[in-house]
Image (tube, coloured by chain):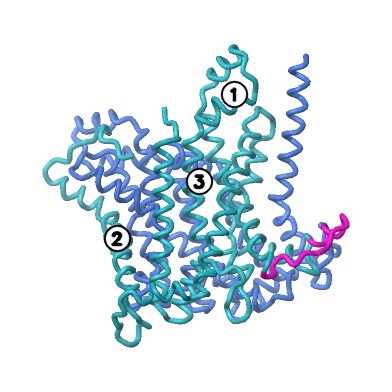
Chain colours: A cyan, B blue
Amino acid sequence: MADTTIPGIKPLGKEKFWLGILLTPTVIGLVFGVLGSIVATIVLSFVQWDLIQPPTWVGFQNFIDLFTNTKFIKAMTTTITFAGLYVPGVVVISLFVALLMNRKIRGISIFRTIYFLPGVTSAVATAIVWNMIYGRDTGILNYIIEFFGGQPVCWLCNENALIAVVIVNIWGAIGEGMIIFLAGLQSVPRDYYEAATVDGAGNIQKFFHITLPLITPAIFFQTLITTINAFQAYEYVYMLTRRAGGESSVPVVVYSIYRNAFNYFNYGGASAQAIELAFIVIILMALYFWFERRFVVYD
Amino acid sequence: MKISTQKTLLDILTYAILIVGSVIMIAPFLWMVATAFKVPADQFTKTLIPNPATLQNFNVIWDKMPDKAFPHMMFNSFKIAALSTIGQLLTCAMGAFAFSAVRFKGRNLLFTLLLITMLIPSQVALIPNFIVFGWLHLIGSQWPLILPAFWGGAFGTFLLRQYFLTIPHELAEAARVDGASLIQIFWNIYLPNARPALAALAIFVFLGNWNDLLHPLIYLPTNAKLTTLTVGLALFQTQFSHRHTVLMAGALISIIPIIVVFFFAQKQFIEGISLTGLKR
């Protein structure tokens, strides 16, 4: 990752000072912005504090409470279900689209632009349209379903809201995944395929024996990024499932952290939730890197 | 002969799937545009061409909101996104230059540490940051949204470093022989040669800030003088839940700057993503 063989100019005399200046923002961000925040959040998770009264030390109570807090358990299961649907959805669909686009056909740039559009536009703006598309009685989606003889679906009701939100999130993430996979596919040397053709390999054999192994770095990277995003997904949940009173029918953990801290002023409890979220993400990352060492091929 | 027929069939299938996919990707945008130009009475009609077509929704959202909220909030979004972009370009380029072109003790350790922070969910920093900005009496101002852009960041530093590494190191060494200082090499060689990567990062940062909902929601009062377009649109959605044509006009105006930037800078954008994803 950090390559020791990278050459570099040696700072001379007074230039050590300038090197310090160059690194100052990064170090401040690292020490105060990230590392300091982690320590602070850990400390905060052991206190009860509304920022007005002085904080009181409660030990592990915030964490113990989380195990019996049905709202938080719901939030955790929602987040994990969300990630379980979203991550494979994004990775598989964007890889499929990239494979199609990597066949030498015309009009690639137009397709690429169209598929990428949802990823650059704000989730808040597109959620406003999706809210209308998903409308039970007035939405275009149910109109189409009924046109083909189906029964209308209450998309944003409790039992369907999670799926509806996952669909919109995948819709918004395909473009970026597609670009990563396209770049990976284009880095596969052409002569590998030519050699395989000479040896009499078919398309399916070529895919499983050449393409797939050689794009494992892209698959690994995209899975990693998508997982991180899955545990931070927030905007569509806020925009599509927030009800009067502020509760959500798809209460992901980030939403729960936001509610606890900034609506209920329960900063200690919210911090404990943030720590638990980070803990799960870190475990997953460790698992991914373990997989990477066994299965990812770098040349 | 047989192979070419097979190829033609595959091509047709490829086009068919890509076109169906394109329709799904673009349909919400078409629906947004169609609804924005419909008269309020037609808001639920299922036609793509508004008949009659009207501009009144744009007039309502732009001019008729209390305190002329919409243009104010749009300006706030622009200001925050632009200042954050400047901050990120400057500070990430500084760090990236040190990590890619300068030799110093602890370089790999510091860089690895920075990379690891990319894996930690940013919500962990949310509450302590809020408390610190509270101590500084900055809650309710736009500073908490702008200042953090000036302390670098893993993503931007990583992206620029990857690009800086492609700049031949001989350039810096030749300049060194001619007596150029560290800062001169940074400013006169690395920055001008990294324009595509800087452009890519600028777009990422601008979009990220323009589209951000969580941070303005936490730090800014819901007041048109201070808050951003995303918070405003979220608020309008609850206030005008039955005026879809007006809402769509607002959503459309809010994404037009993004779409314009995207069309002009698509190449940099896509290269930027590939840059972060491929090389390690």
Residue designated by label 3: A223
SS under mark 3: helix
Disc marking residue A35:
2
Residue B192, position as x, y percentages in the image: 37, 40
Q: Earlier in the sequence, mark 1 or mark 3?
A: 1
Quarter in which the C terminus of chain B is drawn: top left
User: What chain letter is assigned to the residue under label 2?
Assistant: A
Q: Are marks 1 and 3 on the same chain?
A: yes
Along the horizontal axis of the image, is A261 left or right of A16? right
Residue designated by label 1: A206
Q: Which range is magenta?
A: A142-158
* Residue displayed at 74% across by 28% down: B10
Kindly report the distance in space between the C-alpha atoms of the residues bearing marks 2 and 3: 25 Å
| Depicted B263 relative to depicted A78: above or below | above
Q: Nearer the viewer, mark 2 or mark 3?
A: 3
| Depicted A16 relative to depicted A137: above or below | above
